Amino acid sequence: MRVNGLERPDATDPRLLLSDHLRHGLGLTGTHVGCEHGVCGCCTVLLDGHPVRSCLLLAVQARGHEVSTVEGLAADGKPLHPIQVAFNECHGLQCGFCTPGFLMVTSALLATNPEPSEAEIEEAISGNLCRCTGYAGIRRSVRRAAELTGR
Amino acid sequence: MKPAPFEYHSPASVAEALILLAELEDAKVLAGGQSLIPLLNFRLARPAHLVDINEIVELGRIVERDGGIAIGANVRQADAQADPLVRNRCPLLPVALGLVAHPVIRNRGTVCGSLAHADPAAELCATLLALDGRVRARSLRGERVISASDLFLGPMESALAADELLTEAWFPNFVGPGAISEEVRRHGDFAIAGAVRAGDRLAVFGVATRPQLADPADPTRGLSPSAQPECSPEFRLHLLEAVVERVMKA
Amino acid sequence: MSTRLFGERIARKEDDRLLRGRGRFTDDIDEGALECAFVRSPFASARIRSIDVTAARSAPGVVAVYTAADVPFGDRELPLLIPHPLLTNPRTQRCLASKVVRYAGEAVAFVIAESRYLAEDAADLVEVDYEPLPAVVTPEVSARAEHLVHEDVPGNVAADVTQVVGDPDGALATATHRLERRLRMERSAAQPLEARAVWARWDEDERRLTVYNSTQSPTSIRGGLAVLFGLPETSVDVIAPDVGGGFGPKIMLFNPDELLVPYAAMQLGRPVKWTEDRREHFTAVSHERAQVHEVRFGFDGEGRLLALDVDFLHDGGAYTPYGIILPIITAAQLPGPYRVPNYRVRFRDLYTNCTPTSPYRGAGRPQGCFVIERVMDAIAAELGLDRAEVRRRNLVQPDQFPHAVGTMWQDGGMAVYDSGDFPELLRRAVEALGPRPEGGGVGMGLAMYVEGTGVGPYEGAHVQVLVSGKVVASTGIPSQGQGHGTVFAQVVADELGVGIEDVTITSGDTRRFPWGVGTFASRGAVMSGNAMAIAARAVAEKAKKIAAEHLEADPGDLELASGEVRVKGSPGRALPLAAVAILSNPLRYAFGGGAEIATQFQARPGAGPPLAPGDAPGLEATGYFSPVSGSTWASGCHAAYVRVDPRTFRLTILKYVVVHDCGRVINPLILDGQIQGGVAQGIGGAFYERLLYDVEGQLTNASFMEFLMPYATEIPEVEIHHLETPSPLNPLGVKGAGEAGTIPVSALLASAIEDATGLRVDEMPLNPDRLYELSRPARSATEG
């Protein structure tokens, strides 16, 4: 499987969830696990560019596919991705646990829809839970991210 | 919450899948996984075998056929929702898909998976029924077509046999008056009460053990939903009346 | 004091790491740790006849299985965290149950294996023979005491406490108007998105125990582990790394895993980690909110509340480790911002066969607020008065502080409000809310609240200027998303005249700062913020003293700005803070970086030894803040318009306004985030979330599919206004804000929904089905 553009080892145990393979097999702990039944969205990654719940995928199912995680948005030591800059500017995170999921959903949204309407932003973020921010900061962050990536 | 151990199979063809389903005891088909994997994680389902059909290319197609659209077992809900053929020939279906869960779930969940799962509150099951659609089920024993009215037997219980694979769902072309509406607690939740109208046909969901056709003039007739902690039978039927009025007006 | 950064909307310093996915939450830490799973009771009440772990012990990948018998402390009762003389029948659970279980979810066995997958497989093989017993599930059932949760606790009563202020009986008797209400709030739970987790390593060579724990009080855990394992506390390090939300339940201490994981690490010679999953979080981690209040109140024709008599049952769950803090808080501040001259409040803290309760954001205040605000609305309805006007007539006035409520407070003192401007909160909220929107089904809601914040006993901070000129500061309390790393940096940077980018804050790591209490009760900014200021000011004073000698100036003529200590009005005469840091440590051996200036052959000003008696080397100081007179009281007013669909009873919040007073605001951006987030959690708790226990004490909706937390689509943008009445009780003038957003939301939505529907609301949470039920008698009247 490819993760953030690099070939990484596949999982061998078929029941290993993709979320666990990313976090513990590959050491990419930026993807978080909140519920393991697909509701909270903390585990959201991109599979071939589309946001999916990594807790609802077996790691073996990612074989031959391209997975994108939050670690792929900005390389170590390199500047933050505009989406990340936006979330910082607009206070779109507090504890940071749900944040990678929102970043990936936003990244997929802006890749196909660089100027989303309010309704489109709402629809895109409507499937991820946040317990800290009350979503206002996240909405502002996604709007700002659209501005910053548009430039 | 981690799945109990299982044997994993990833057939490359329908033929291979059917052999597996015929030979294996206690096997479940894995398509989108958005309903099945939570059950595995909770250990509420502990199949000895998982037959993953995601690598079967021929199941990933949407084609026109017989005055309708055939949607293969692997077609993602999101892809069906966006597909130009679907949007052109059966615009009610993308509208119904828009009410299914959340976009992220639809990126992985399949149209056929939802039908095979047979949740009485599922939008797609009722939509198939309202449109008088059907599914194709294949096994080593042969192939059969199951109409929507015969497919859903009870809560999470479809007419599929253990060795059968639902290979495609067929929705008729339909551009007549149609609408879907539901009452939910949160955006994206399963319906407390819902209705789909396609022309003269009205299917209601969330109010019985399976989606059912109903008479728009008397939609609650014969229905006795069970009592749920957050929804009394009376309230569910009360909501159904409101929802039916909405779809009939649209 | 400089105010360059204090009060500014500064973007957070913590974000970079978290945004990159480089946060370090406890489950992220691996280092070859073994993983664990609990076997938990499926029954709410049962005797255990036998536990058989033989099959589990020999399951693949299993290293050990513990029952109570296998662990020296296994059968010992866990600590009673907050004893109280009025808590007459406290009970705490054992680390692992072996004879009886009292709530579904109680821990019975602990499996340690190579992976969580294998641990869960083995846990499935543990055979426990239970003899189910009748379960006591609600406070009302508990009060009837047909069955006892603890055989030796009569009536299921842990505590029965009555407080009286004035003459409530007399005032009730003579009041021209009297009403009664039975007001009920159900159980709920915080559900942070990161469940709990504990990782531990025992270093045999260093004889050192290191624990990472998603906790709100590392210092307390450290103390407890040291005592339990007979280790010097200086050999135990507890760190709360990044924590994915706390909201209260993570201040509940000495959960079985917090003892078992370190124990296993010590026994097995390998790091051990336990990560909770969502399903067990639902029953294994504290709940709160369930209370039933019988309320009688008397008032005059002008709507002034003359007497209030409240008798309430608190559902404490199966054990009382957190003592009676919750009902004490409800009782103490139930009067809210209103003058209640005659007040009796009685509470009974009752045992039930449900998950034990401990504070969840609001901690007893939402219940009290619900009661008093329903009283205000009831008075208004009875007299045909405007609801805001009735409140206005009852508010404690700005010139009436300090205002003693007359009740005891959670810190052992009395509840005394120190400052505030309640009428102004109300006025601004009503003004900001504006005119009622057009259309049917619209209702307006109002709720005011007070919040005792910044409870002691103390917090501390250490601030140090490094030889590089950068500043590091640390405090004992951990963060769960409140932005301490930024807020405290603002305080320190202001005191030391440095840029915020030059200050790094460490919190919740006993290796850096081992003293402290914890993050709870909206006390972080008040306690540690002030401790930071005190420590930083001491550093500034020391810097001036050292610099004064070298600049040949008087310390009083010096100021800290732009990273230097300089003579006011003489820009050329300055010493960089880095140099002062070097000079603070008399050296024999220079080590580069300009350290030569501190060595012994350099010219030194002044006579006397290099280090004067009482002085210490280093440009650092430790400071503590310990409030003399208890909490400092924040307050606020929430106002909203809602629409309730007359047919489907779906709720839409049209406009939501908060006017909030938490004294001086350090970072309005972060504060607004706390309030918006608090309101969201309050909306969830008022209209979406419920814990559905069946009559057998089973939690039937223990998943996010059925426990409905709001998504973005359910939460409006809250309009937030700030009022600042500085606290007279601490140097920074700040008050706490963490819980403010949540406290009045149930009261507010009850008020608004009642106004929208005409249905009387006596219970929360609500949902469309409940509203439909409430509307039924009226419906059959019109249909009949």
Image (cartoon, rainbow, N blue to C red):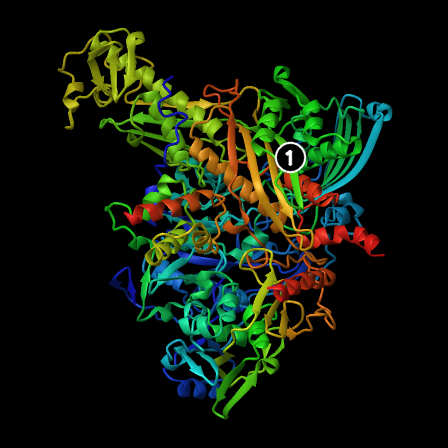
**Residue C518 drawn at (x, y percent):** 49, 35
- Would you call the spot at circle 1 few (<14 residues within 10 Å), some (14-19), or many (20 or more)? many
**Residue C368 drawn at (x, y percent):** 67, 35
**Quadrant containing the N terminus of chain C in the rendered view:** top left
Q: Nearer the viewer, residue C651 or C766?
A: C651
Horizontally, residue C695 falls left or right of residue C235, namely: right
Q: Amino acid at mark 1?
A: Leu
**Quadrant containing the C terminus of chain C in the rendered view:** bottom right
| Residue at figure coordinates x 56%, y 65% from the top left | C126
- Above or below: residue C726 compared with residue C445: above
Q: Tell me which chain the residue with mark 1 is part of.
A: C
**Residue C251 seen in render:** no
Horizontally, residue C303 falls left or right of residue A70, namely: right
- Above or below: residue C566 compared with residue A121: above
Q: Tell me the quarter of the picture where residue C616 sits.
A: top left
Q: Nearer the viewer, residue C70 or C306?
A: C306
Q: Nearer the viewer, residue C193 or C391?
A: C391
Q: Nearer the viewer, residue C31 or A16?
A: A16
Horizontally, residue C462 falls left or right of residue C601, namely: right
Q: Secondary structure at mark 1?
A: strand
**Residue C751 drawn at (x, y percent):** 68, 39
**Residue B250 seen in render:** yes
| Residue at figure coordinates x 50%, y 93% from the top left | B141
Q: Tell me the quarter of the picture where residue A62 sits.
A: bottom left
Q: Tell me the quarter of the picture where residue C699 sits.
A: bottom right
* Residue that carries the numbered disc 1 in the rendered image: C446
